[in-house]
Each structure stands twice: as C-alpha cells, then as structure tokens.
Image (tube, rainbow, N blue to C red):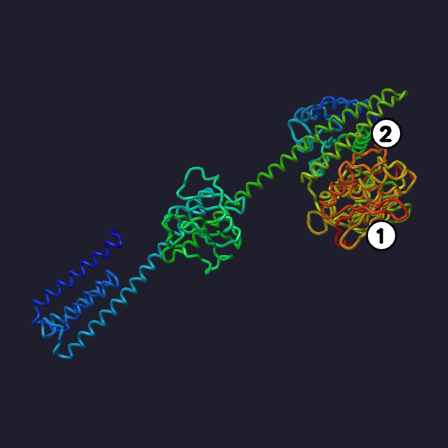
Amino acid sequence: MARESKRADTLLIVEDDARLRAIVADALRGDGRRIVEAATGADALAAAERERPQLVILDLGLPDLDGAEVCRRLRTWTSAPILVLTARANEAEKVALLEAGADDYVTKPFGTPELRARVQAQLRRARTAPLPGSEGPVTVAHLVVDTARRTVTRGGEAVHLTPTEWKLLRALLANAGRPVTHAQLFRDVWGDIAGDAQQYLRVYVGHLRRKLESDAYRPQLIVTEPGVGYRLAVEPVSASDAGP
Amino acid sequence: MPGPDRRRVRAWVLSLAALAAATAAMLAARPHLEKAHIALIYLLIVLVGSGAGGRTLGLTLAGLAFVAFDWLFLPPYGTLILTNPLDWLVLLAFLATSIVAAQLLTRAEGRAEEARRRTAEVRDLAALGAETLNAGRGEDALAAIADVIRTTLRVERCAIYAGHGADMRLAARAPALGAAAAVPANSLLMWVAEHGAPALELLDGTSRVGAEAGGESAWPDTRDARVLALPLRVRDRTVGVLHIEDQRGIALAAGGREFLSALGYYAALGVDRLRLTAEAERAAAFREADRLKSALLAAVSHDLRTPLTTIKGLAHAIAEHGAPRHDPRASAIEEETDRLARVVGDLLELSKLTSGALRFQLELNTADDLLGAAMQRVAGIAGGREIRIAVEPDGALLTGRFDLVHAVRALGNLVENAIKYAPATTTIELTARQDGPMLVLAVADRGPGIPAAERERIFDPFYRPPNFPPDVGGTGLGLTIARGLAEAQGGSVTYRPRPGGGSIFELKLLAGERPPE
C-alpha cells in the first residue's frame, strides 16, 4: 500500500489517569506517530479540533463529560476512528457507545499488544475507506465477494445466499473489523420496519455461517460480540490486489 | 332548637289545654251544637295531639274526649248513662276513629323520623368517606374515623389497631392522647384479629367472644359490655381491629349496628391504606438501595480495573525494555495481574449476582453464538487443548431464550473448569442438544471426577477439591457463578459422573421456539 507511509499519524489519547495515559502513549509511540494527550473531555474536544488526529483513544471515566457525549460531539465533524477504553464490562454501555459513533472498545485491564493490534486495525480500516466493495470484488479470508454482481464464491465454488443473507453479509462487510450492534444490523437489513424478524437476526447469522464458515461453532469470519452484536473479524482485501 | 323531651312536654301541655278550652267553649254553646260538630272538633284535637306528641298522647286525648263527650254533651248531662241508644253508636264511632287515626299518624311520624335518621347517617358516612380519601396522611384519615365513631355512638373511647399478632399496633384513637405509638394490643384484640370475629369485654370483667367469620348471627349483644372489639376486614382479609370502650356499657341505637359496620369498613380501608403506603415507601427505599448498589459496583469496578491496567502495562513495558535479555520477573507481574483481574472480576460478578444488581435480558439466541463466544472466552487459557464441539442432531441450528452475555460466562466457566482439572492430553467434549423445554450444553472431561460426598459442595463459593494443587488458578468461584447465572434465567447447572471416568457438567437454559427456515 503506497499511500500508507506518506503521512505520520496523529493519535489523541484521552485518559484522566496520568500514569495510564503515559503507558498508553508509550505503547503506541513509534512509526513516526505524533501523540497528543488530554485529561478531560473538554480538553479532548479542543485538542481534537486543533490537532485533527487520525485516531482518538477515549477513556470512559472522564471527570467532566460522559464518554458517549464526547463521541457524539466528535462525530459531528470528524470520521476519525474512536477507540474506547472502558472499565465496566457492561454491554448496554458498549452498545450506547457504538451507537454514539465509537468504532471499537477495549475492556480494562487490557494488554499492550491487544491495544496496539486494535489501533492498527482501526487505522488500516480508516485508510482503506471507502470500501473496496463498491469498486470490485473483494477477498475475505477464503471467500471472494462481488457486491456489484451479488455473488460469493468459496474456494472457487459459488455459494447461494438468500436476499436476507446477502444483505446481512453486505452490512457486515461495510463495517469490517468493527463491532456492529444488533440494532444497526437490523436497520441495514430490514430497514425501519420493526417486527418479529428482529429476534431472528441471530438465526439468520447462523444460516449465513453455515454457508460461509468452515466451522460454524468456531467462526473465524462472523464473530459474536455477546450482548452487542457481530463483527466481521477479517479485513477485506481488494480482489485485484490479492491476485488471481 | 328544643330537645325532643321538651318538645314532647310542650305537645302534651298544649294538647290538654286545647282539649280543655274546646270543651269549655262548646259547653257554653251546647244548645246550638249538633253531636257531629262536637265529634269533629274533638277528633281534630286528637289528630293534632298525636301528630305532635305521639301515640300515647293521641290515645290519652281520645280517652279524655270520649269521657267529656259522654259526660257533658250526651243527655242526660252530668252522667255517663245514655238515654238514646243511638248515642252509643256516635260515641263508639268517635272513639274508634280517634284511635285508628292516632295509630296511623304515629306510624307515619315514626317512618319520617327513621328516614331523617337514615339521611343523617348517609350524610355522615359520605362526609367520612370523603375525609378518608382526602386526608393527606393515612394516620389523619384513621384519626378522623375514630373521632366520628366515638361521637356518633356516644362512647367514651374508640381506637383502631392495625396489623396482626405481635405486629399489631395502635394506629389511631379518639380522643387523641399524645403519642399513641407504643400501645400494645391485648390478647382480646389479638383473638379478634386472628379469628376475624367480634368479641366483648363485659362490665364484670369477663370476656365473651363471637362465632368465627363474623356473620350476622355472631353479632354480640353489647348492652352489658364495656368493650366491643370488631375485626376490620378488606376483601375477606382481617387487616386490623376496631376497639370501642365505654365504662357505662355500650348502647347501640337501632340501626347503630349497620352504621358501625359501615364505619368499620371505612376504618378497614384506612388501615389498608396505611399498609399500602408503608409498602410503597419500602419499595421506593429498595429501588434507591438498588441504584446505589449499581453505582457503587460500577465505581469499584472502575477504581480496581484502571490501576490493574497500569500495572499490566508497566510490567509489559519493563519486559520489552529488557530485551534481548528478557526479565522473567516482569512477565510474572503481568501474569499475576491477569490473575488478580480475574479474581476482581469474579468477586464483582458474585456480588452483583447475590445483590440482584445483574440484569438479565432473555432473548432468542442461538446455541451457535453461545458455543462460539464461550470458545472465544476460554481461548486465552485453552492452550493447545483439544475441545470437540458437537450439536445434536448434527449441524442443527438450536435456539434458546436466554441472556447471551451471562450464558457465555456460565458455559465459559464450565469449560475453564474442565481445562484446569482434566489432564492436558485428554479431550474435552462440548455437546449441545435440546431436551424438551430445555437447551442443554454438556461439558464432559476425562478428569478425576468428583467423589459423591463433594458433589453439591463444589458449587459453594471458594470451595476447592481436596488433594488439588493450590496453584491450579481460578478463584474458586467459577461454578458458583455459573450456577447462579443459569438459575437467575430459569436454567440450572448440574454435575454427574461420566461413565468411564471424568465429569459431566450440564448447563440447562430455556429452549427457544422453532426458528423460521
């Protein structure tokens, strides 16, 4: 990828605990990255406007502003990925954050390698947007998905998907690498029509996995995020880049 | 307004005076009067008299008029003897007419009086009902009711007790006597509350109790009683006791019984209102405690996890900086931090579970999601262990109605347990099937199994099997939490020995309805 190395990334780290902030900053330094730190929500919003970061790491226990509120305000003008650090293993809160515009979350206590991996994934994802799917076929693990022709091939063989399964796959693909809430998947697949179908979302995911995964009980592609939704765990690569 | 006695005396005096005056006037005009005139005038006086003074006055006037008529106006004058036999007819007809008229008038008057009394009662009851409903506090309403009962029945004291048995306490009394709280109920009141029937304390100090269930026939005669205790009932439930006391004896006027029943019903409603208010206050207190509990747990969770993250990060940084000579002590810190984090996590989970702070969202979920997420959860500690997953029938899409987050945690704990206690070379088998209304997830291992005596104790918090190395990891809370999480959503976790050696732990959850194809 030629365009990746041209520009150094700016990362904004928002965390009120000074020690932890320093550790996170140290862990993410490197590759010529510029690290900007903020201790409060107000500082964070000001720093974000000033520094235009490529990624924001946001702790939820801020003294002044609610984390979801910071997400919402950032989302009014920037599409930079927001990675949330949360101490509560509370799924309802995670859902609220994702709906407010966060891209991913890491639960404390987390390890440095895990944090780095999540940050890398978000930066890559932000750079490859808009999705290659809109241009041509993409390779996702052992699958080739052609959005324009509405075809999926698995190991060279065509896979038949029902219209609902197809919409579901497309919705997951559009958010590859980030958790998608049940509500958002439902909106993407069924539109705004609420009804019985919503509770069968999980069943449709089961059908889709049986067609796409090699082991439906140990999914590598469509991973369950308990209490939140699903995540397409593999990043799509443009089929032409991947080679024939 | 004059009292009823004074009015009665006046009626007597005036009627007798009118009779005398009329007799004197008619005597003066005797030569010009016909017998019919005299009979009519006397009849008029009898009617007016019985209307104003009642039956006795009417009959007295009739008697006197009869004698005066015979003596003064029927010849021969001055004697009771009659010369003309037809005069007997006149005289007897006059007497009969007077008596009948007096009787009819009195009866009508009585009915009117009864109607007036009823009207007054209804008015009192309506006013009392409005007062009961409008009073700001339940205690005020009860005090108003006690006061109305006391003044209406003209008794010395009226008290209302609420509750049962040892919990029974004075709720209101008239006349009010300062602090009323500490007055305990005596055994008579407790008997009334327990049996739902009225009871009396007689003037001679003995007690008499009514038949159970308080039917009409059980209503006691109260004249020689100084205490009347009535059960207060709402919807066939005794909620308290009404206590009426008068050292002179309790005299209930006609209809007083019905009036007392109606008042007693208001009192019962008032007592019930006190109970409901107390319950509502308790519920509000519980909600507030619940909110505080959740807030506290969230704060504790945050305050423990943030420093753990810092320690873990620092240890990792030290290990990295030490490269290429890796310092094993730094890795040990990181590992211990992870262990501490698990302990903190388990303790928080258990305290949330036991304090009812966990919320369960029962939704249609697939066994796929549960199995997959549980495997993800144990991935970190599974190492190279072989875990075989099977669904019966093969490849079926099983569903259940459960909270995925908590179910994943429960199943994860069972799998983690198998990983910890079964030898590393053995296979762990994870099976999902539907068994009637339950979705069953079985975790089978080839570990040492559990001796029969220990099989229920393994679910106790902090229990560890004897003869096991203490550094096997974990907190001793895994099975306790798994069972708690399952039971809280209508499921269960059970143990049974595995044929051929080893253990089978079964997590049962509510099965789901058939999914669409």
Between B491 and B34, the residue placed more toward the observer is B34
Question: Label 2 amino acid?
Answer: Ala
Secondary structure state at the residue bearing disc 1: loop
On screen, residue B470 above or below B119? above
Residue A68 position within the rendered picture, expressed as x and y whole percent measured from the top left: 68, 33
User: Percent x, y for residue B178?
Assistant: 42, 37
**Image-based side of A228 in relation to B210, left or right:** right
**What residue did someone put label 2 on?**
A2
Above or below for A228 versus B343: below
Q: Is residue B488 positioned above or below A48 on the image? A: below
Asked if residue B468 shows in the view, the reply is yes
* Nearer-the-camera pick, B476 or B208: B208
Image marks 1 and 2: residues in contact by CB distance under 8 Å? no
Residue B329 % position (x, y): 85, 22
Q: Tell me which chain the residue with mark 1 is part of.
A: B
Asked which secondary structure carries label 2, the reply is loop
Q: Nearer the viewer, mark 1 or mark 2?
A: 1
Q: Quadrant of the C terminus of chain B?
A: bottom right
The CA span between labels 1 and 2 is 50 Å
Question: Could you classify mark 2 by the number of other residues whose Cα lies within 10 Å: few (under 14), some (14-19), or many (20 or more)?
Answer: few
Question: Which residue position is annotated with label 1?
Answer: B392
Q: Kindly indicate the quadrant of the structure image that contains residue A134.
A: top right
Q: Is residue A50 above or below residue B395?
A: above
Residue at horizontal 73%, vertical 34%? B347
